[in-house]
Image: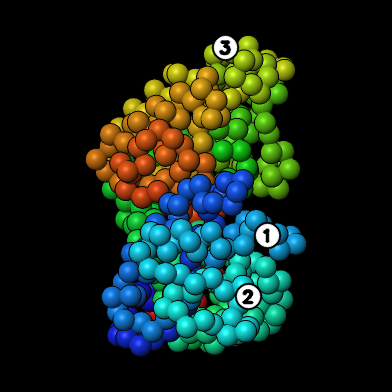
Amino acid sequence: MNLKTLKDMGSLAGKRVFVRVDFNVPLDDDGRVRDDKRIKLAIPTLKYLLEQQVSRIVLATHLGRPKNNEANLQTDNVALKAAELLGEPVAKVDDWGENGLPEAKIVMLENIRFHPAEKSKDEAERDTFGKHLASLADVYVNEAFSNSHRKHASMTSIPKFIPGCVGLGVEKEVEAISKAITDPGRPMIAVIGGLKADKIKAIHNLMGKADRILVAGALACNLLKAKGFEIGASKADDEGMEEQADLVKEVVRSDKVELPIDFVVADDFSETANIKTVSADSIEPGWMALDVGPDSADRYAKQISESKTVLWFGPIGVFEMKPFANGTMVVGQAMAELSGTTIIGGGDSASAVKKLGIADKMTLVSTGGGASLEMIEGKELPALAVLQK
């Protein structure tokens, strides 16, 4: 994508650097960080900046989806965890530098979404806030790939006022995903699961790039329904499918797109429900598909094992429940044993490989499901577009 990187910025000695991070991490009931993976991913960039002897690092992140600036979504504990992982003090600022910044090497601003202009639909309003944030630094760094598909003030407005680039983590993610799309090792397989019909666009785009697209999850039931199959009480995104009716017709006709031949079905969304395995054309009314069947899982795993590049977006089944985790486990294990390129598209897929203990065997576990999916769809990510050379 020809992005400006940290190396392109030259010497940063003595510079003030604004780093937009994604520290949107899960918190315990007492507010402490439960999973620090996203914070850890930004540490290499922060250490690089310290080695460059910058005068100050200003960190900004969103946390959750605040409605009334809830106290449990303040960034105090995130700042403490960042300091622990970095081995350097991180001073928390209760506003956005409106009252000045403390004399500290590293400062963490309050939850950026506490300010209404951050997500404003009015570009001028976003830019006014972005200009203020830009006044706190000399250089901007985007280390929040997962939010790069958003037109938010801290993502797209700040680089209008000061020079900007991507951080080391974003650079790595973009390079890996771009290469997998534009110059993949062959055969290239895409595994697309989950529920929402918005992945239809990604499937349609991949039809011109992948050698095979293996569909699973509730999305597979949606496509089977579009072909006239009975899917019982399985989850369906009827509205989303209807909105993309023309694309759906092309997808179900494509000989590159493969749907499951059997499912594990249950008469209730529960681990204690009655469960059985049926063929794809035998789902009865009142029963819901909660995982692909063993024959489908084996077929998918065999094709993965023979490929050189695999992209996986969205869960295969309801892997959080043991009776419906086999498809996810079989697909995940096949990817873990592959010597080629394996990319996990964030969100539930990332949670699945983490739960299986195989995340470290993947080429890339993307931090951004939405951002990486839009890259797969061929869309331009606005927060990256403003950082191109």
Dot 2 amino acid type: Asp
**Contact between labelled residues 1 and 3, with CB atoms less than 8 Å apart:** no
The residue where tag 3 is placed is: 276
The residue where tag 2 is placed is: 95
| Horizontal side of residue 229 vs 18, given as left or right | right
Dot 1 amino acid type: Ala
Measured in 3D between alpha carbons, the distance from the residue under mark 2 to the one under mark 1, in whole angstroms, is: 13 Å
The residue sitting at 58% across, 85% down in the picture is 100
Residue 290 has which mark? none
Which of the colour schemes (rainbow, by chain, secondary structure, one colour) is used?
A: rainbow
Quarter-of-image position of residue 73? bottom right
**Which element type, helix, strand or loop, lies under badge 1?**
helix
Residue 255 x, y percent position in the rendering? 47, 35
**Contact between labelled residues 1 and 2, with CB atoms less than 8 Å apart:** no
The residue sitting at 32% across, 69% down in the picture is 47
Dot 3 amino acid type: Lys
**Which element type, helix, strand or loop, lies under badge 3?**
strand
Q: Is residue 184 visible?
A: yes
Of discs 3 and 1, which sits in the foreground?
1
Residue 298 x, y percent position in the rendering? 39, 22
Q: Is residue 212 visible?
A: no
The residue where tag 1 is placed is: 71
Measured in 3D between alpha carbons, the distance from the residue under mark 3 to the one under mark 1, in whole angstroms, is: 46 Å
Quadrant of image for the N terminus = bottom left
Residue 27 x, y percent position in the rendering? 56, 49
The residue sitting at 66% across, 47% down in the picture is 244
Does 387 sit above or below residue 303?
A: below
Considering only order in the chain, which callout, 1 or 3, is on the residue closer to the N terminus? 1
